[in-house]
Image: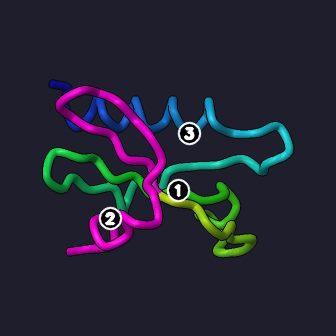
Amino acid sequence: MISEEQGRLVAEEFLQASRKFSEPELAIDWNRVRVREGILIAPYNSSQFLTTGEHQLLDCWPILVDLSSGQARFGRLEERAFWKGP
């Protein structure tokens, strides 16, 4: 089991490791991170969009970190109700 703070670090490392050279700088939207059912949900987008509101990237499924195992992955379309829910 990892803490929410550790989960945030895992999400950040996962995002940076998954970034392709051709992609713009990416950042987690820390104001929208939440935990639901033991899963840390970390939405992200381009750093520029998060600071200026310009150049939003599409299809940025959030990073999901299982706090019981510490494993991170991108959310899947069929899980949208889970990570979009309350």
| Cα gap from disc 2 to disc 1, whole angstroms | 13 Å
**x and y percentages locating residue 66 in the rendered image:** 26, 38
**Image quadrant where residue 73 sits:** top left
Secondary structure at numbered mark 2: helix
| Cα gap from disc 3 to disc 2, whole angstroms | 17 Å
| Cα gap from disc 3 to disc 1, whole angstroms | 8 Å
**x and y percentages locating residue 59 in the rendered image:** 61, 66
The image shows residue 23, relative to residue 79, as above or below, that is above
Q: Earlier in the sequence, mark 2 or mark 1?
A: 1
Does 68 appear in magenta?
Answer: yes
Residue nearest the viewer, comparing 61 with 8:
61
Please state which amino acid type lies under the numbered disc 1: Tyr
What residue span does the magenta drawing correspond to? 62-86
Mark 2 Cα-neighbour bin, 10 Å: few <14, some 14–19, many ≥20: many
The image shows residue 76, relative to residue 17, as above or below, that is below
Please state which amino acid type lies under the numbered disc 3: Leu
Secondary structure at numbered mark 3: helix
Circle on res. 83? 2
**x and y percentages locating residue 11 in the rendered image:** 43, 38
- 3 vs 26, left or right, is left
Please state which amino acid type lies under the numbered disc 2: Trp
The image shows residue 73, relative to residue 47, as above or below, that is above
* Mark 3 vs 1: CB contact within 8 A: yes
Q: Give the residue pinned by disc 3.
A: 15
Mark 3 Cα-neighbour bin, 10 Å: few <14, some 14–19, many ≥20: many
Does 14 appear in magenta?
Answer: no
Q: Give the residue pinned by disc 1.
A: 44
**x and y percentages locating residue 15 in the rendered image:** 56, 39
Of circles 3 and 2, the one toward us is 2
